[in-house]
Image: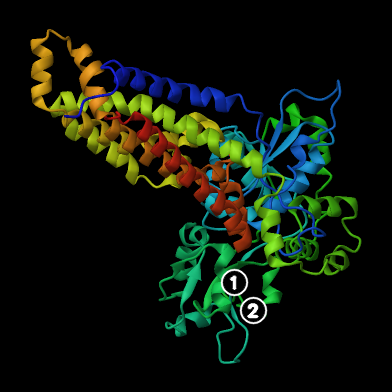
């Protein structure tokens, strides 16, 4: 005959200790030192093949003094190489006169624009054609003066043309003369396979208008811009969209198709900013204005090549440009170090100086999200189990939240909260973690034998006493399994936080996607997978400690 080795009160005590530990975990994580800002790549001399994370951007090194303005100038950038570089140039320039930080890789135009309008960032590098067609929805090109008048009611301005234009174009592999040479000729080649970036497919000045202008019958596939060149070279697709300052155009010997119908507008690079920046940071703004006209197309192509082809870091390339913007940049790029051992390069990226800061950021997001979701989902699951009429609605709402695409949810939270960073990422992760905890709690409580509940009633226990001493202890293994599932899922989902500047291992993944750098992608994915396995092992130990011992 087996009997319990522990007394009857140990199970509730374990339950109380477990939930107290969940509440304490976020506080302990929050006490860790502040994580470093977003990942950056080291210098070319150390890792010439591609830019892994290294020292934080210029935000940590502004000039300080009694005359410095209060607050911090927040500079954003989109998730492609040129925007990263321009963001670094702007940050390094402003950091000499005001505290400045680079919120890099914030996603596509929609996300970074919402961050600007909400005041989460103060300015970012943009392109005239994007503002004209995509943001203001003009059908025909407008002058810069007209664009400024329309932006003013939004509290925004456009200024400081940097000196180059980076327009959209379509490109094919070079080769046979029989291939189309113009965009209009594509209409006579319906067999061609188009692989276009997701933003280009959806934006007003992208595929919809282009297909209508040239009567193109093809149906494009969505490709991330970072992998489009390799997909074209491998023959997976025949036509891709490019930026005219892309460094890989020459590397792959591509044929850029002539825009014979003059569809694409000019995409002069300039700053899109909040109108109060000049008043809040007057010296930094004057320094940024001094960049007007200083970056030529050749220089921008050379800087893109330094990052994408030579593996130099965004900040190193930006510093070299600011030190000598017109002198010998291309020659310095060509003089890169010889490639080092591939495994050594990968290990350097994996265990770079940003490893522990990114780990702290990732752990903090996971701990806060899972603890918060547990405090919300367990009571909801209990209510759904004890009031069966509530269960369908509760499960339907929790399930519906799981179906919302992560980037769409983040894009909605930015204007709602008026910020980017940890809070919107935390709310998104919390919502995604609810379903497994609610479902398992409801299932565990519902599986408690009816006979035990009748016995509790006969003994005169109140509903709260029955829940505390009978329902929760018996349901705890099932509840723990739900929390474990939520925790493991959250470790993977937390990589989306990097798209809105919340950090974590997603920083490496976004840079790897932007540069099509597999080593960088693995340097972000492997620690996330290891953390998920660690989380699974931790909860397995908790479940084993919870199980009553027999003798």
Q: Which SS class for mark 2?
A: strand
Is 307 left, or right, of 228 in this rendering? right
Residue at image point 79% right, 59% down? 44
Residue 219, located in which quarter of the rendered image? bottom left
The residue singled out by tag 1 in the image is 229
Circle 2 residue: 254
* SS under mark 1: helix
**Residue 429, image quadrant:** top left
N-term-proximal mark, 2 vs 1: 1
Q: Residue at 9% across / 25% down in the picture?
A: 450
Quarter-of-image position of residue 455? top left
Residues at marks 2 and 1 touching, judged by CB atoms closer than 8 Å: yes
Task: In this rendered view, identify the residue nearer to me: 348 or 51.
Answer: 348
Query: For the residue carrying disc 2, how many other residues have a C-alpha within 10 Å: few (<14), some (14-19), or many (20+)?
Result: some
The answer to whether 236 is drawn above or below residue 432 in the figure is below
Instruction: Give the number of the mark in front: 2 or 1.
Output: 1
For the residues marked 2 and 1, what is the alpha-carbon distance in whole angstroms? 9 Å
**Few, some or many C-alpha atoms within 10 Å of disc 1 (few <14, some 14-19, many ≥20)?**
many
Is residue 265 in sight in this rendering?
A: no
Work out whether 450 lies above or below 434.
above
Q: x, y percentage for residue 123?
A: 67, 40
């Amino acid at each position: 005959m087996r009997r319990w080795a522990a007394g009857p009160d140990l199970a509730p005590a374990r339950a109380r200790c477990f939930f107290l530990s969940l509440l304490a975990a976020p506080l302990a994580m929050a006490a860790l030192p502040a994580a470093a800002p977003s990942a950056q790549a080291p210098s070319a001399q150390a890792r010439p093949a591609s830019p892994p994370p290294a020292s934080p951007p210029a935000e940590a090194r502004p000039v300080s003094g009694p005359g410095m303005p209060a607050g911090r100038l927040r500079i954003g950038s989109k998730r492609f190489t040129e925007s990263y570089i321009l963001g670094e140039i702007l940050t390094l320039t402003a950091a000499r006169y005001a505290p400045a930080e680079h919120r890099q890789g914030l996603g596509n135009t929609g996300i970074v624009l919402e961050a600007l309008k909400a005041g989460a960032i103060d300015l970012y590098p943009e392109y005239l054609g994007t503002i004209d067609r995509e943001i203001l929805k003009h059908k025909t090109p407008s002058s810069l003066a007209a664009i400024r008048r329309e932006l003013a009611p939004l509290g925004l301005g456009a200024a400081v043309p940097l000196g180059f234009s980076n327009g959209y174009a379509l490109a094919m592999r070079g080769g046979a003369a029989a291939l189309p040479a113009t965009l209009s000729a594509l209409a006579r080649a319906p067999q061609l396979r188009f692989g276009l970036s997701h933003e280009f497919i959806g934006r007003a000045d992208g595929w919809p208008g282009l297909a209508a202008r040239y009567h193109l019958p093809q149906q494009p596939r969505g490709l991330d811009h970072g992998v489009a060149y390799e997909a074209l070279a491998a023959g997976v697709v025949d036509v891709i969209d490019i930026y005219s300052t892309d460094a890989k155009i020459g590397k792959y010997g591509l044929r850029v198709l002539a825009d014979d119908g003059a569809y694409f507008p000019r995409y002069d690079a300039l700053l899109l900013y909040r109108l109060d920046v000049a008043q809040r940071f007057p010296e930094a703004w004057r320094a940024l204005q001094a960049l007007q006209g200083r970056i030529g197309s050749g220089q921008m192509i050379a800087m893109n090549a330094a990052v994408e082809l030579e593996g130099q870091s965004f900040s190193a390339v930006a510093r070299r440009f600011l030190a000598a913007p017109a002198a010998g940049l291309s020659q310095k790029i060509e003089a890169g170090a010889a490639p080092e051992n591939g495994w050594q390069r990968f290990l350097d990226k994996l265990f770079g100086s940003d490893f522990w800061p990114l780990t702290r950021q990732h752990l903090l997001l996971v701990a806060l999200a899972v603890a918060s979701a547990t405090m919300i989902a367990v009571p909801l699951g209990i209510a759904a189990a004890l009031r069966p009429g509530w269960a369908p609605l509760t499960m339907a709402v929790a399930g519906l939240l799981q179906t919302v695409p992560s980037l769409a949810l983040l894009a909605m939270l930015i204007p709602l909260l008026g910020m980017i960073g940890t809070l919107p990422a935390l709310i998104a992760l919390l919502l995604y973690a609810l379903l497994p905890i609610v479902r398992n709690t409801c299932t565990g409580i519902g599986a408690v034998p009816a006979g035990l509940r009748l016995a509790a009633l006969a003994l005169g226990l109140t509903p709260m006493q029955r829940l505390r001493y009978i329902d929760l202890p018996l349901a705890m293994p099932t509840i723990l399994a739900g929390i474990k599932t939520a925790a493991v899922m959250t470790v993977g989902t937390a990589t989306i936080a990097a798209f809105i500047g919340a950090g974590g291992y997603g920083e490496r993944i976004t840079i790897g996607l932007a540069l099509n750098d597999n080593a960088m992608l693995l340097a972000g994915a492997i620690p996330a997978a290891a953390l998920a396995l660690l989380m699974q092992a931790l909860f397995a130990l908790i479940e084993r400690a919870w199980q009553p011992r027999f003798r």
